[in-house]
Image: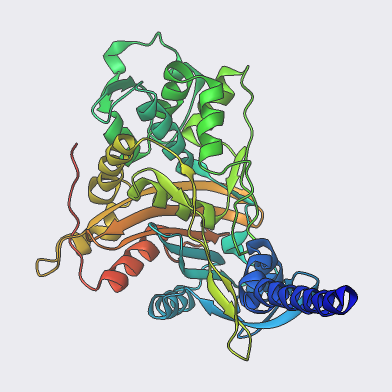
Amino acid sequence: MTQNLRKPGKRLFFYLSFFVFGLVCFFKWVLPKSEHAELSVTKAGIAASLKSSLDSNFFPNRVEVENGTRKINAIPSYTLDLLSQHRMEKIFSQYRPDYGAFVAIDAETGAVLSLLSYSRDPNDLGNLSLKATFPAASIFKVVTAVAALDQKKAEPNTIVSYTGANHTLYKQNLSEKFNPRWARHVTLREAFARSINTVFGKVGLYLLKPEQLFDYAKRFQFNSTINADVPVQPGTFYLEAENDYKVAEAASGFTRTAQMSPLQGALMAAAIINEGVMMEPYLVSSLHTPQGEIIYKVQIKPLGQVMQSDSALKMRSMMTETVIRGTSQKSFRDLLRKKKSQEIEMGGKTGHLTGLSPKGNYDWFIGYATDGKKRVAIAALTINEDTWRVKASYLARQFFEGYFKTIKPTEIKP
């Protein structure tokens, strides 16, 4: 009798164990199948799958992405604002610079709204908006200005004395001993808007330490790999810290030792309008299979706090000055005169230098615009060997006008 009672108990235990094991397998592997698939697709994987298409300025309807140990044919959902993208394509086709690139991103999320590369050269140069072979030029003044503001070494209204022309940089003008008879006096805000090299050379030389320039360059993603779902090259920054003149050159952007991509430039402007926080950029919001299974969904993340929020506000006051009375005034002048338009704040920074890859005169504009609800940041770059066909600041102005429809900038005076 004892043996007969034990046999059914063993069988029941076996069946229950098998049933429990089946339930564990079901809940662990079957139900969350799409969730596990989603986690195995990375931004780097998406970037690799998009590279050849983006190099041809093409956004494919299907991509092959690695999902764990297998490859999946997936359908991407892009973040592009198609009206803005088509508008900028049309403008580039109209003005036809030798080379050009344009990037626009949502400053609060990092979503890429426009990504454009243009070239009259029949040779394949890749996607110029993602290449980092371009000298940052005076765009690097943003790094120097933020470092000075963040470290409490200067304010937008700090008066700086200087000699020499605005866009040159000579050793004698950097000396602390100069004849005050020939000195001119400007605020840091005015020097930024007019892109005065000597002023920023002196800021880098006398107010900041070389390691602080390195630190803030790193914060702005120089010498860093940007975590993105597009194959963007890392920007580079090199500084001969023991050479005073080289430090002044770097701080003013009067050098080729700092190079960046247009995407990085857009991120720099985005951090300023986003209270000092730089977001990870992304072009693909999700991926799904032809059967509709979602295998990837972007996670919106910050790259880091580049500057203090009060420094970001002060930088906005300096960047609005560039648009209203500074180096990009001509491009925005007619826009400033429009009366029947909603109020919007715009700011930017220009940069100009000759470069070698590709060869030509480089013209930069990075900037932002906000109507209090939308915050958009852009970077525009045009390169011409001989004849200027269109300024980068004009491309920015065209984008802002199209994106916000009607615009009237406001000044920020903290």
Residue for point 65% across, 57% down: 358
Q: Residue furthest bottom?
A: 291
Is 101 displayed left or right of 410 in the figure?
right
Q: Residue furthest top?
A: 177
Q: Nearer the viewer, residue 145 or 36?
A: 36
Position of residue 277 relative to residue 403, above or below, is: above
Q: Nearer the viewer, residue 63 or 80?
A: 63
Q: Residue furthest right?
A: 3
- State the image coordinates of residue 47 (x, y, percent, origin top left): 66, 66
Is 335 displayed left or right of 137 in the figure?
left
- State the image coordinates of residue 142 (x, y, percent, origin top left): 42, 39
Q: How is the image coloured?
A: rainbow
Position of residue 263 relative to residue 60, above or below, is: above
Residue for point 20% across, 56% down: 409
Q: Quadrant of residue 242?
A: top right
Q: Residue furthest front?
A: 1
**Quarter of the N terminus within the rendering:** bottom right
Q: Quadrant of residue 109?
A: bottom left
Q: Is residue 405 visible?
A: yes
